[in-house]
Amino acid sequence: MPSLLCLVLLQLTRATPGDDPVPSLLGADTADPALSALVAETLARSPVHARVQADVSAERERVPQAGALPDPTLVLGIQNDGFKSIQIGVAETSFWQVLLNVPLSWPGKRGFREDAAAARVTVAEAALQRVRLTLLGDVQRAYLDLRLVRGQLALQGRLESLWQQAEEITRARYQVGEVPQSDLLRSQLERTRLRLQRLALEAAERSALHEVNRLRVHPLDEPVETPVPLTEARPGALPAPELLVADAEARSPDLTLATRGVTVAEARVKSAYRERWPDLSVTAAIMPRGQLEPMWAASVGISLPIYWWDKGSRAVAEAEQVRTSEQQGVEAVRQLLALRTRERHTALSAVLEALEVYRHGLLIQSDATVRSTLFQYRVGKVPFASVLEVMRGLVTDEGGYLAALAEAERLLIGLREVSLQPPSATDGVSSAAGTVPGSAVSKTASAGAGAPAPSSPAPGM
């Protein structure tokens, strides 16, 4: 039943007008049903997403307000001759008064104001898309952290099994006097250290679980399944950087925000020019005089823009400068977007090449070396120091492979998210997930992947 609900939420979320992004050139990660359910729940329950949706609705409500006519004014009064008695019907200049004043904007003013308000709606819609993509990226990264730490726990279990075998071999040889007691003590010491490492990884797993549940607005300790292990991740072929840049420009909410900001500025310029024209007012009044003939009055008023130079001309100049600023902002966002996309393409290319080396060489050789060394130690051909060396090499190689897989997935998430943040800020391997303690990867996660870390500063977005 929960899975059916998640699928329904996913369909409802996808059916929301204005929420669907332009399909990514890289495609979405749909192989993991658990991730799809997490994404659906997050978009359906996130207070951040709901808040920005409410902002969009509020902007839509402002559009008819901007184009509405000003309220008319009704004046009720009396004019009387003297203070001793009511003279209406007796004195010609005494009467009741009913007056209605209707202000009218110069033709075109309300239309331009409404256009500017409608343009602001499109800006709010682009902001909603930015929040949506950011939420998707956050969920995918948090889920990736959980898969990474669970992959490290699986590696930890394998190491514990190997060290148990090593201890059994050492104990058997020690009992017949083939090795010194220090070999047995050292193997027991390594197994004890593994227990400490497992405690650290289990704490990291709980932290990753809490982050996933926070994003989907569930109890923090609620279990989350990861049916697809990280080791089964197989990033596809990477498109050319030119195609990725074009794809990013087509989907980027930040570029859309900047472009629509220009549209809003254009509408404000047109409105500022139209505001220099005077406003009108129409007044009609009737004055009943009792038994005498009633009087009536009608008039048309016009405002005098005698302070145009101090107010109107300055408003036009301000709107034009804002338009220039927004136009320059579009180009700045486009350049930054191209830079971030190429940075991720470069880093991801290096990581994919490193993964090929891991799969087709390093992991196979490392596993064979461990098995061979344990066998040779069993028959007394190598010292215990060789066992220690190959075990540490296995930790480095297997941990580096997991880190490289996680880094590749994070870079892909950043490309789908169309983030303007530098890869080092959003795509690097999370320190919360950690690596297998004691491995070389724990000192530098990117070293195992062979991907350079960009040094570009984060934009002030």
Image: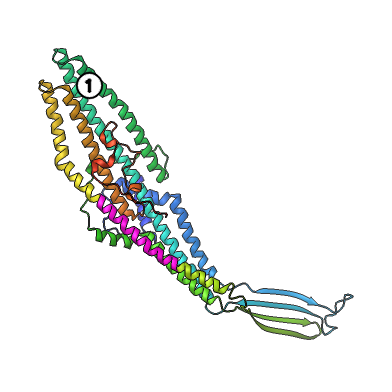
Give the image's coloring scheme. rainbow
Q: In the image, is residue 229 above or below residue 80?
A: above
Q: Is residue 280 above or below residue 53?
A: below
Residue 292 placement, left or right of 49:
right
Does residue 431 appear in this view? yes
Q: Residue 23 at what x, y percent from top left?
A: 30, 59
Q: Residues within 10 Å of mark 1 (few under 14, many from 20)?
A: many
Residue 411 among those drawn in magenta:
no
Q: Relative to 80, say whether 443 is above or below.
A: above
Magenta segment, prevailing SS (helix, strand or loop): helix
* Image quadrant where residue 325 sits: bottom left
In this rendering, position of residue 16 left or right of residue 443: right
Tell me the amino acid under the disc marked 1: Ser
Image position, residue 268 (x, y; %): 49, 70
Front position in the image: 371 or 265: 265
Q: Residue at x 28, y 33 (%)?
A: 436
Quadrant of res 210: top left
Which corner quadrant of the image does residue 386 belong to? top left
* Residue 326 magenta-highlighted: yes
Please give the residue where the numbered disc 1 appears in the rendered image.
187
* Residue 338 horizontal/vertical position (percent): 31, 59
In the rendered view, tell whether residue 60 sits above or below residue 422. below
Q: Name the quadrant of the N terminus.
A: top left
Would residue 1 be seen by someone viewing this image from the given angle?
no
Q: Which residues are magenta?
A: 324-347
User: Which of the image's four quarters has the C terminus?
Assistant: bottom left
Q: Is residue 62 left or right of residue 160?
A: right
